[in-house]
Image (cartoon, helix red, strand yellow):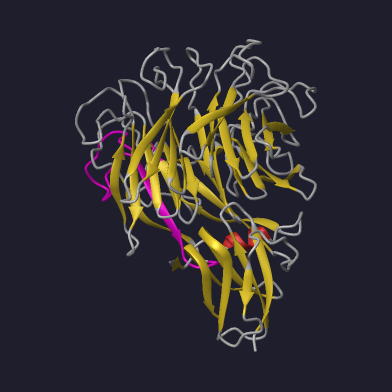
Amino acid sequence: MKNKLFPLAFLCFLFFQGNAQSLNEISKVVAADRAASDNFGCAVALHDYMIVGALFEDEDANGGNMVAAAGSAYIYERSGFSGAWTQVQKVVASDRSSIDQFGTTVATHGNYAMVGAPNNGKDASGGGNLYRAGSVYVFERAANGTWSETQKIVASDRSASDKFGNSISIYGDYAVIGCTQEGEDANGGAPLQRSGSAYIFERNASGTWVEVQKIVASDRAQGDEFGQSVSIHGNYALIGASYDHKDENGGAVLDDAGSAYLFERDGNGTWNQVQKLVAADRGMMDRFGYSVAINNDFAMIGSHFDDEDENGGNTISNSGSVYMFKNNGNGTWTQAQKLVASDREVDERIGFSVTMSGNLAIAGSQWGDHDQTGGNMLVNAGSSYIFELDGNGVWNETIKMTASDRDANDLFGTTVAVSGYQIVVGAYNEAEDDNGGNTQTGAGSAYIFEYSNAPPVSVNEPTFLPAFNVFPNPTAEQLSIDLGEVVPEVRVFVNSVDGRLVSEEQFMQEQVLSLNIAAIPGVYLVRVVTPDGKMKTVRVVKQ
């Protein structure tokens, strides 16, 4: 099964080498029915599509039926490689009610999107009200491009004030949902107030998302708020507990130092805690684990109240930091690097939000005051920092991002998302529309950035599947790519030798891929990419 891709920029990201490219703000997006205090941009997610939350928005999908702070989310699609991102739909909860704050969290992967409403009190059927128990709504994209609510998810052991849905992450057929205020253990007993939990859901053969496991920290304690942040990728789930006091061994108490817990899915489908991660230079009130991201062999953990630089010195109060942990190959994750802003300052709080994709990592700093040059101070305008993984396995800061129309208290960097070659940054307190006018305080916006001027591709990547084969080569019309095994998802990009994108396709659950290249002249490059960033490029000659 194959389908055309919308975010063609994915390919260009894979060509990124050092600072050979520039980063451009390609668009600013706002809600079509924006209004003051909607807080559009409080949550963003980006994969094949983009979704933006607006937790205080009041109107339904048609712009009527006002319900105070019921919340909403907006879905955007992109047309073609250089096309603009366009709002295609506004979604709201089927059982929306006052102060639900639907849109507080969002996640998307493939044709699915999830939206959290942590203040919603109703159960999956829209009844059984429990004050702020929390819920998550599942939306699916149909073949005609319409997104429809297909399911409402709640915790199997839901209770009042749990705030299920305060964090969400999706990858493939799995989703992990945080519930910081929940108090029981995995079996529904041993209550500890606000110890926190997370729930793993799996999409079954009929397309229904089913709760398969509740997970908690092995050393859970009152007030830890396990589930503050969540991220899932492959067989790993990473859960933040930013109020946890204990080190990786359950001792060395430091108030609110924070931690993160790594769970791995075994061959039986059970998710087991395999490691607890803490900062090597952990300190009181650092809030390590407030934000987390996991991708391939790296785990990224924000600590936005940390004070020290990458060497553990040069104290600057609440400047913030981000820690990179790496899987060493035998199942143990170790701290590989601590990242701080090059222009760190008091109360900048880098690491409030984090995201990763391939060789890019983004850290948000919504309280940053200065522009890219370190000047033009605007209080809490906000900024975000890009770190790139080099060939030696080192993460280096390459670019600081700020909004083109930045202003005081915009809070740019509240949330960040990256997919391939594009980055989206939320600024939920920003006031102007996409043309810089029509001021509405706190309406909110999101900014989309993209790299440009990619250098020509290389054909020197190692084969990522042992039996990979391309035939016939040369060929006149039909090209076959044998992956050697059935692969859940791959993307195939065809480029001219100077790097110009000619075509792209996505294949799902296939081993032998078929491309018609009859209209493509001369020599060209075919690149096959998996979602985790592994790739193979082959030079093909057209007869």
Q: Residue at x 28, y 41 (%)?
A: 93
- Residue lying furthest front: 268
Left or right side of 116 for 299: right
Is residue 441 something one can see in this rendering?
no
Q: What span is in magenta? A: 54-82
Queried whether the magenta region covers residue 46, the answer comes back as: no
Quarter where residue 236 is shown = top right
Q: Position of residue 514 (x, y in %)?
A: 52, 75
Left or right side of 54 for 384: right
Q: Position of residue 178 (x, y in %)?
A: 44, 30
- Residue lying furthest left: 127
Q: Is residue 482 above or below residue 362?
A: below
Is residue 522 something one can see in this rendering?
yes
Q: Residue at x 55, y 67 (%)?
A: 82
Q: Nearer the viewer, residue 184 or 45?
A: 184
Left or right side of 302 for 335: right
Q: Residue at x 26, y 31 (%)?
A: 98
Q: Residue at x 32, y 24 (%)?
A: 157
Quarter where residue 334 is shown = top right
Q: Nearer the viewer, residue 343 or 176?
A: 176
Q: Secondary structure of the magenta portion, mostly?
A: loop
